[in-house]
Image (cartoon, rainbow, N blue to C red):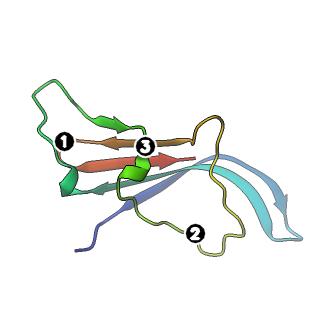
Amino acid sequence: GPVQVDVDMFVLSLRDVSFMNMDYTVQVYLRTRWKDSRLRYDNQPGKVKYLNLNDPSKVWRPDLFIPNEKEANFHKLLLPNTFLRIYPQGNVFYSVR
């Protein structure tokens, strides 16, 4: 069935506003949360609160899009700026910059 995905955006910077071109540059953290029961695991009391995944591509992630965007890029330094955490009941938190 359908998966409910909660999304929030944290704006880090807003710059290069052009009223003439009707565009701007924004840097954000795009954060999503959902539940995937296939990822549930046995949490031994007091031992494992959550799992951090170094390679988020191994897990299904929602395909998000922003209507009317002109261009979008993922922020990269040495490694992709992503973060994925899985909780014992299958709750997933994913953040990308």
Q: Which residue is mark 1?
A: 88
Residue in the picture at 31% in, 49% down: 92
Earlier sequence position, callout 2 versus callout 1: 2
Element under disc 3: loop
Judged by depth in the image, the label closer to the viewer, 1 or 3, is: 3
Residue sitting nearer the eye, 85 or 25: 85
Residue 85 placement (x, y as % from top left): 35, 41
Tag 3: Cα neighbours inside 10 Å, few (<14), some, or many (≥20)? few
Judged by depth in the image, the label closer to the viewer, 2 or 1, is: 1
> Would residue 77 be found to the left or right of residue 35 on screen?
right
Residue 65: image quadrant is: bottom right
Classify 35 as above or below 52.
Answer: below
Tag 2: Cα neighbours inside 10 Å, few (<14), some, or many (≥20)? few
Classify 31 as above or below 64.
Answer: above
Earlier sequence position, callout 3 versus callout 2: 3
Q: Which residue is mark 2?
A: 66
The kind of residue on which mark 1 rests is Pro
Q: Which residue is mark 3?
A: 55
Element under disc 1: loop
The kind of residue on which mark 3 rests is Asp
Identify the residue at the far top of this view: 46
